[in-house]
Every structure is written in structure tokens, then in C-alpha cells.
Amino acid sequence: MFSVIKWVFWGTIWVLVLAVFHYTLPQVDIVRVTDTYEKRIDPGENSLFWAEADVGSDGTVANRDVFFIQTRRAKGDVMVYRNEDTGWGWPPYFKFDTSNLQAEAADAKTTADAAQYFALKHYGWRNEFFTIFPNAISIRPVDGPDASKGIPFLNIFIITLFAAIAWAIWVRWRRFRMARIDPTLEAIEDDMAEKSGAMRRWLGTWKKKT
């Protein structure tokens, strides 16, 4: 039973870690920009998935105007991105150029008959049920819908660094456990076994008297 609980616990931890990486690490979509717009947003239960107010604005206002970029991806499905500053907050993209990016996206609009494709870098998820949108980071023109997204060197570096740190921590913890914790637990178990044996012997003497 304890083994099952341990596996469930660590499985849940690793699922959460993977979810954080999948949400925060940058991804690239090849898209055709179809429209851009601005909309008043009142973050509610999904406020965790909205960035803070734009840097330099009054962050005390509950609702605010948010830029959006409507696109159709190269494989044909529709994707809508929000366009918000991340500022000095999380995730650490240090994005301060929301207005400039919106202007670039507006200038990139094309129709299906005269399609021009762009590599749009973003982070986050799209979920219609919870009204969650990925946040656009940058946009650049590409040759066409089959253009390469490039090698995600940053993602590879971050994941490799995290794996190395996690491995180093695990190795040191294992050594510490084998050197300090396991001998202590074994000594406690031996002591309890010895006391339990002594108790049984003592009870045995009383049985003989009766």
C-alpha cells in the first residue's frame, strides 16, 4: 500500500512539472494572420492564465483591454492568441512590446487568396471551456506553410539543465539516505524488535506463574 501511495505521489509531482514546462516554454506555430482586435477582459476564475496589466499602467484596475491576434494555422485549424506584456513577472520573457507586436500582427493580415505565413512564437494553452489563450511573444515572416519551425535550442537547454539539477539532487539525497536515514531507521526497528521480544518474554513469565 505504501509503495502505491509513493508512486501516485511522485507520478503527480512529475505530471505537474511537465505541465509547467509545457505551459511556460516557448512554442512556434506557422500561421496566417486573419485579424487583430482589442477586447475588454474581466479576469475571473481563469485569472491565473492572464498576465498582469501592461507595464506602466495602473495595475489596480480589475478589468482591462487586451489585444488578440486571430490566425489560421498551416494545418487549417483556427487559433487565437492574446497579446499581453509579461514585464518582470512569470514566465520570465521580459516582454514589454505588446503594442509593437500588435502593430506587426495587424500589418501581417492576409486573405486565403494572397496568403502570407508567419512563425508566431508563444507560450501557454488554448482552452475554449475556460477561455484561456496562449500569449504571443513574437512574429516573423516565413517562406510558406511548410516552413521549418527551427530547433528549440532554448527548450532543450532548459530541460537538460533541469534534468541535470534533478539528477544531482536525487543522487545526493540517495547518498544521504543510505548514510544517515537508513541506518537510523534500521536501528529504530532493531530496538523496537528487541523491546517487543523482551515484552513477550516478560508476559511469558506471568503465564507460567498463573
Image: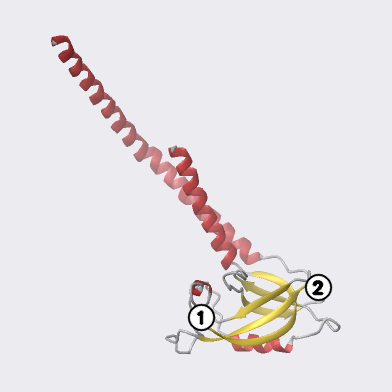
- Residue toward you, 72 or 175: 72
- Inter-mark Cα distance, 1 to 2: 31 Å
Residue 81 is situated, as x and y percent measured from the top left of the image, at 64, 77
The quadrant in which residue 94 appears is bottom right
Disc 2 marks a residue whose amino acid type is Pro
Counting every numbered tag in the picture gives 2
Disc 1 marks a residue whose amino acid type is Gly
Which residue has dot 2 on it?
145
In front: label 1 or label 2: 2
For the C terminus, the image quarter is top left
Q: Residues within 10 Å of mark 2 (few under 14, many from 20)?
A: some
The quadrant in which residue 23 appears is bottom right
Image position of 139 (left or right of 129)? right
Secondary structure under tag 2 reads: loop
View extreme (left): residue: 209
- Residue toward you, 63 or 181: 63
Decide which of tag 1 and tag 2 comes sooner along the chain.
1
Give the residue drawn at x 57%, y 67%. 24
Secondary structure under tag 1 reads: loop
The quadrant in which residue 106 appears is bottom right
